[in-house]
Amino acid sequence: MKKIIYSVILIMLIITGGCISGNEKEEIDVVESGDIVTINFIGWEKETGGIFDTTIQEEDVTKETELDDTHKYTPQRITVKAANPAPGTIRTLPGLEEALIGMEIGEEKIVEIPPEKGYGYSDENQVKKLERIQEVPRYINVPIIEKINYQYLEKMVKGEIIPENTVELVEWWDVDILNIDKDGIVEIKHHPIMDKVVPTYYGPYKVVEITENEIKLEFSLKEGEKLETVNFKAIVIEIKEESVVTKLDYKVGEGVRNTLPECEECFTFGKVIEVTEDYVEVDFNFPLKGKTLLFKVKIIDIEKAGR
């Protein structure tokens, strides 16, 4: 009788031990909605095979490049399918986020994303005709003392922006920092240089007069000369008493910076698609709109939501 009891106990211990062992088995984390996922990837256009983005810090990346440990990376951290991304993370394309769901750390796959789950389709309202004849002011007046937003000013100067400091206004001259208010508005005082040519939104202008309160700048190019700024390219057609007549000078395929107030939703740069005597037609749609994209993506880390 004792042997039978011992046998039953032994069987129960074996079964119980098996259950305990099974419960202790570590679960494998997979990507779920709300998780923060660190990935490396290579992205290319399906039609052309051209690489448009990658986390690999090299210039010779192709779609065949392996996501292995032979490269230096700048991994991307994504909050997957969350209305509000966690600090230090971004949301990415819907199609890519969907593909990440269920993947494990170390897993790699190639994902195809159609336009409707990528950057969408082109918008005809973002194709604009720009009149080729444009007038810019012949003279610009700059106050000796003026106020500039701190964030804008810091992109223009060399030196520390603190009261009583003198810093270099790049490609212009030195300015004194007089005051910074609670809203981040900086009051500066210019130290202009007579006859100096400086770059402006409209092109190069020359200092022609300095008074106690104002600096007078005059357009410095002559008729027939080419004008190129960060915003547009043109040829000087005529210099009038108060303005300068220019003609936009672009070829099909060239890039144009978006400075149109009525096109705030347009991409930062556009591509010239037609040039006539009267206008330049520019497509300001994001270049990847309407494109089917492919991603080679690898999961580097998963931070589970709520942990």
Image (cartoon, rainbow, N blue to C red):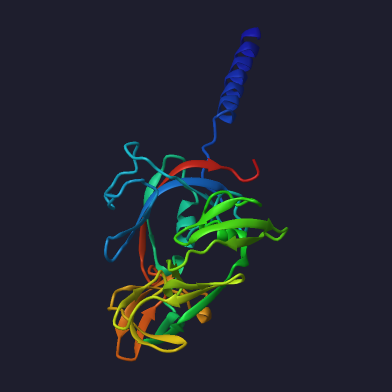
Q: Nearer the viewer, residue 146 or 121?
A: 146
Q: Nearer the viewer, residue 258 or 232?
A: 232
Q: Position of residue 89 (x, y in %)?
A: 55, 50
Up-down relation of residue 226 to residue 305 (above or below) = below
Q: Residue furthest bottom?
A: 278
Q: Position of residue 101 (x, y in %)?
A: 50, 51
At 65% from the left edge and 8% from the top edge, which residue is drawn? Answer: 2
Up-down relation of residue 138 to residue 107 (above or below) = below
Residue 164 visible in the displayed image: yes
- In which quadrant of the rendered view does residue 7 lie? top right
Residue 131 visible in the displayed image: no
Q: Nearer the viewer, residue 233 or 276?
A: 233
Up-down relation of residue 30 to residue 218 (above or below) = above
In the rendered image, the quadrant that contains the N terminus is top right
- In which quadrant of the rendered view does residue 118 lie? bottom left
Left or right: 75 as drawn, with respect to 225: right
At 39% from the left edge and 66% from the top edge, which residue is drawn? Answer: 114
Q: Position of residue 178 (x, y in %)?
A: 66, 57
Q: Position of residue 148 (x, y in %)?
A: 61, 64
Q: Nearer the viewer, residue 17 or 2?
A: 17
Q: Residue furthest right?
A: 182
Number of marks in the rendered image: 0
In the rendered image, the quadrant that contains the C terminus is top right
At 54% from the left edge and 61% from the top edge, which residue is drawn? Answer: 191
At 36% from the left edge and 69% from the top edge, which residue is drawn? Answer: 291
